[in-house]
Image: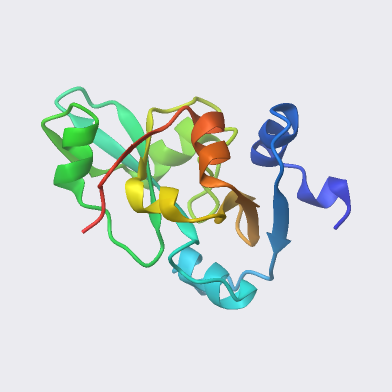
Amino acid sequence: MPASDSASPATKALVKAKVAHVLHSYDHDPANHHFGEEGAAKLGFDPAIMLKTLVVELTPSGKLAVAVVPVSGQLNLKAFASAMGAKKAAMADPAAAERSTGYIVGGISPLGQKKRLPTCIDESVMEQPRVLVSGGRRGLSVELSPSDLMAVTGASTARITC
């Protein structure tokens, strides 16, 4: 893939941080709104190592934060709120998530966000040798080590899946 086709704020952040990574692209079906599952199926990866990036609103502060969980799992909002030191958490309004991160829903990456949000990665992810996250647009995934993902995002880890 030519560099111009793969350049996104997410991939630029990895290059700047000198993090080893592999890009994987696929043709996104605009009718499919199960972005992570689609990527895992089209790229042939186990959904346990394909991660989804979810933008969450914390209360009472109203601040946004990011949860990174396996596509095969479901975010536990109560556990996420606790991990982030909040009373409650709810999925953020998609428009607010897009404004804050600079990415569109289905292509939100934990990397290279317009405004770096506090991030928590599900602890199960750390057991994997490699994981895939959104590369910053629909149809582009980035493969890297969980420790590199944690380092570049400044994330914490906790058990945040059901």
Q: Left or right: where does residue 47 sit relative to residue 145?
A: left
Quadrant in which the N terminus is drawn: bottom right
Residue at 82% over, 52% down: 5
- How is this picture coloured? rainbow
Is residue 36 left or right of 69 when viewed as pictured?
Answer: right
Tell me if I can see residue 113 in this picture. no
Who is closer to the viewer here, 143 or 96?
143
146 in relation to 64, above or below: below
- Give the residue furthest to the right: 2
Q: 48 or 65: which is nearer to us?
A: 48
| Left/right of residue 145 with respect to residue 124 in the rendered view | right
| Residue furthest left as drawn | 87
Q: Is residue 129 above or below residue 55?
A: below
Residue 60 spot, x, y in % from top left: 14, 25
Q: How many marks?
A: 0
Residue 146, position as x, y percentages in the image: 51, 45
Nearer to us in this view, 113 or 74: 74
Q: Is residue 116 above or below residue 106?
A: above
Q: Is residue 141 visible?
A: yes
144 to 100, vertically: above or below: below
Out of 97 and 20, give the one closest to the viewer. 20
Q: Quadrant of residue 73?
A: bottom left
| Quadrant into which the C terminus falls | bottom left
Whole-percent x, y for residue 97 in the image: 41, 39
Left or right: 79, with 120 as reference point: left
* Identity of the residue drawn at 71% across and 42% down: 20
> Percent from the top left, x then y, of residue 23?
72, 55
Residue at 33% across / 31% down in the picture?
64
